């Protein structure tokens, strides 16, 4: 869907800030900046040198391998891409330059020195992703005065949307921005964001992994890590900050959309102007990270919103609406509207100065006395010192307003759809040692301590005893489908059918992998069903293609799955959906390892007309769809779709069947 935004800009180059070094000519240098002393070599030489590190079970032994091997892997990817890219590069000469840099990095491993940035110089680095095991870049600028003997604040910058972004052409800032960071005393970290992911899902994971790497390698003050972003990256500040309150010291969002219900109808055909007209499962998938629906989560967090008054791409009304909602809650939020300005206010150095100097005195507040929090999912179950232990029902948001008295002896909470509430013993402002008095929804509440010493409040009726299978939904195992791609996963091609069936599954798996690569700039591991070992089962979510007859691994699981799968024939809650144009995709706990997901693709492949950035984010827990009709511009029409309940069971309340004319 986001690809449709391209028609709203004059040329894609205008999406880039002035002075941006979008495509830096690669230099044949060591990772530490010294001239590389590596003989001429080809891509195959770097491939061979990296072969020992490509096994699925390879893990870096130390910080040296953790920094140098992914950097070399990234150079290999760039070398492959650079071949034939004569417009921005010199074809094979650029590829050879990347190869030399990769080989130079590997040659430094015996020296035992991790790859680190140099003060005053923008440095490209890389890490090995936790989910699809691909080398992902990030960019670090250390102030000229950087001294590891003291702790430094860090700005994490989230970039805007650019259709052509790649590891060869990353969205990075111009020199004046680094001068601004230097002047304000910040380390500046720019995650790649896996291209144009809105910094959601795999893009959010990229932000956290790049931040983790920077914190591990440099002297970063954990109380002064800030998030700042422009356009799509400004929206990323909203998404991350509001779904995970209490992680960052402060946020500056520039020219960002805040409400998908008013944003999408302007640019997408058939998207309803009234949110009530959305199918309920799609509405949930929009609102679970829609900033205006999570405005109460801004409490105790510092936001500075900046917007051009006459922005033609993202109306300033998007910022005005969010700011008013937050202020109406009695929460402080700063707003600056640039008079007579359009979208690209972030071309102007003074805007970054205004934003980043605002960050300078701010620290993370870990122990506020009052926390308000709304969430649609146990995947996002905590705010500051407060964690939702369990929902009462799935499919509706949980809401918490909890306060601790000045003396720390009493807790008062108002909750909706919350069964238990957990107060972190390390950061909650409750009196240590004594059990606080608790009032929940106007009544005295039961309290207890868990094995970690956290205070547990009972807010709703006790859950019915859970069966041995399936497990109850929880953080890390609650769906929807896109959540399965945020942790380690492998794609599994079926080979148990006829030669023709196996070839069709191979083509479908390859198509899915190609689409993932174009979406997230990396190719996940592909295994045959016969190659999945106990070690793979223990450490990975499985993305299975086929049916029980054509995929031997799916055959082992099928009897314990809630949906019956045949050749373009699917049975959901006793009703059969059958047709040559039907497909199925769903996620579920893996019966062979209930700590991990299994995702099944069967029949036709979902999303043939979806933009590459939105193949996964409008799929609920399960979806049977057809390839005849499309809604909301490019989304496959559903036959039946929905969410599993808290016990991973089908529920009529959470299942939507298309009404046929």
Image: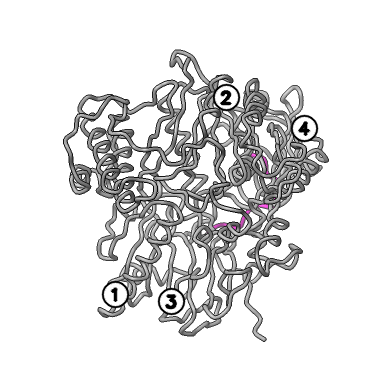
User: Are the two marked residues, 2 and 4, in contact with CB atoms closer than 8 angstroms?
Assistant: no
Tag nearer the camera, 2 or 4: 2
Q: Which residue is the site of mark 4?
A: 332
Q: Is residue 114 above or below residue 536?
A: above
Q: Which residue is the site of mark 3?
A: 603
Circle 4: is it few (<14), some (14-19), or many (20+) Cα within 10 Å? some
Quick one: label 2 or label 3, which is nearer the N terminus?
Answer: 2
Going 32% across and 26% down the picture, which residue do you hit?
33
User: Are the two marked residues, 1 and 3, in contact with CB atoms closer than 8 angstroms?
Assistant: no
Quick one: label 2 or label 1, which is nearer the N terminus?
Answer: 2
User: Are the two marked residues, 2 and 3, in contact with CB atoms closer than 8 angstroms?
Assistant: no
Circle 2: is it few (<14), some (14-19), or many (20+) Cα within 10 Å? many
The picture quadrant where one finds residue 568 is bottom left
The picture quadrant where one finds residue 593 is bottom left
Q: Which residue is the site of mark 2?
A: 180
Whole-angstrom CA distance, mark 2 to mark 3, is 53 Å
Estimate the x, y position of residue 595 in percent, counting from the top left: 43, 52
The C terminus, quarter of image: bottom right
Q: Which residue is the site of mark 1?
A: 502
Whole-angstrom CA distance, mark 3 to mark 4, is 51 Å
Tag nearer the camera, 2 or 1: 2
State whether the magenta stretch is mostly helix, strand or loop.
loop
Q: Is residue 399 left or right of residue 646?
A: right
Estimate the x, y position of residue 469 in percent, counting from the top left: 47, 61
Tag nearer the camera, 2 or 3: 2
User: Are the two marked residues, 4 and 1, in contact with CB atoms closer than 8 angstroms?
Assistant: no
- Regarding residue 382, the answer to whether it shows in the image is no
Q: Is 368 in the magenta?
A: no
Estimate the x, y position of residue 120 in percent, counting from the top left: 45, 21
Q: Which residues are magenta?
A: 456-466
Q: Is residue 655 above or below residue 534?
A: below
Quick one: label 4 or label 1, which is nearer the N terminus?
Answer: 4
């Amino acid at each position: 869907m986001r690809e449709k935004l391209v028609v709203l800009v004059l040329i894609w180059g205008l999406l880039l800030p002035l002075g941006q070094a979008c495509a830096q000519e690669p230099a044949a240098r060591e990772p530490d900046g010294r001239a590389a002393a590596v003989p001429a070599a080809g891509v195959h030489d770097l491939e061979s040198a990296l072969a020992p590190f490509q096994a699925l079970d390879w893990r870096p032994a130390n910080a040296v391998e953790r920094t140098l091997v992914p950097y070399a892997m990234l150079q290999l990817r760039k070398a492959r891409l650079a071949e034939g890219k004569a417009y921005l590069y010199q074809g094979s000469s650029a590829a050879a330059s990347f190869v030399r840099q990769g080989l130079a990095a590997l040659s430094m491993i015996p020296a035992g020195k991790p790859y680190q940035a140099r003060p005053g110089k923008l440095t490209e680095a890389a890490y090995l992703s936790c989910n699809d095991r691909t080398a992902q870049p990030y960019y670090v600028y250390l102030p000229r005065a950087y001294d590891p003997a003291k702790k430094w604040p860090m700005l994490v910058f989230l970039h805007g949307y650019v259709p052509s972004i790649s590891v060869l052409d990353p969205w990075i800032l111009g020199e004046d921005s680094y001068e601004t960071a230097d002047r304000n005393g910040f380390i500046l970290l720019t995650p790649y964001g896996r291209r144009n992911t809105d910094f959601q899902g795999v893009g959010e994971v990229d932000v956290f992994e790049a931040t983790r790497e920077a914190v591990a390698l440099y002297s970063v003050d954990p109380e002064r890590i800030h998030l700042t972003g422009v356009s799509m990256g400004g929206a990323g500040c909203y998404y991350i900050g509001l779904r995970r309150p209490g992680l960052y010291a402060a946020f500056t969002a520039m020219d960002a959309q805040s409400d998908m219900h008013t944003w999408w109808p302007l640019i997408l055909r058939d998207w309803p102007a009234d949110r009530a007209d959305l199918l309920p499962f799609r509405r949930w998938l929009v609102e679970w990270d829609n900033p205006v629906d999570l405005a109460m989560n801004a409490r105790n967090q510092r936001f500075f919103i900046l917007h051009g008054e006459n922005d033609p791409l993202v109306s300033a009304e998007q910022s005005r609406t969010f700011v008013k909602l937050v202020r109406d809650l009695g929460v402080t939020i700063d707003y600056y509207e640039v008079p007579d300005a359009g979208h690209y206010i972030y071309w102007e150095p003074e805007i970054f100065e205004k934003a980043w100097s605002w960050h300078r005195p701010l620290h993370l507040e870990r122990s506020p006395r009052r926390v308000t929090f709304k969430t649609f999912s146990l995947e996002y179950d905590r705010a500051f010192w407060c964690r939702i232990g369990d929902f009462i029902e799935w499919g509706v948001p949980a809401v918490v307003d909890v306060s601790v008295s000045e003396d720390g002896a009493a807790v008062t909470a108002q909750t909706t759809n919350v069964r238990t509430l957990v107060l972190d013993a390390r950061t909650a402002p409750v009196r240590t040692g004594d059990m606080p008095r608790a009032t929940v929804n106007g009544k005295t509440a039961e309290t207890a301590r868990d094995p970690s010493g956290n205070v547990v409040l009972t807010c709703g009726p006790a859950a019915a005893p859970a069966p041995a299978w399936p497990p109850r939904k929880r953080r890390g195992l609650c769906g929807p489908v896109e959540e399965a791609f945020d942790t380690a996963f492998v794609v599994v091609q079926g080979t148990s059918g006829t030669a023709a069936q196996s070839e069709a599954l191979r083509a479908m798996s390859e198509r899915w992998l190609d689409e993932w690569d174009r979406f997230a700039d990396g190719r996940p591991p592909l295994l045959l069903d016969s190659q999945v070992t106990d070690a793979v089962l223990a450490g990975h979510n499985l993305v299975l293609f086929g049916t029980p007859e054509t995929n031997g691994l799916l055959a082992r699981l099928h009897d314990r799955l809630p949906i019956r799968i045949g050749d373009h024939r699917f049975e959901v809650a006793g009703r059969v959906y059958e047709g040559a144009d039907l497909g199925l995709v769903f996620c579920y706990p893996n019966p062979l390892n209930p700590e991990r997901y299994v995702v099944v693709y069967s029949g036709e492949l979902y999303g043939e007309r979806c933009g590459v950035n939105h193949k996964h984010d409008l799929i609920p827990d399960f979806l049977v769809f057809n390839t005849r009709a499309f809604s909301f511009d490019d989304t496959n029409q559903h036959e039946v779709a929905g969410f599993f309940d808290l016990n991973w069971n089908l529920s009529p309340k959470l299942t939507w069947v298309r009404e046929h004319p």
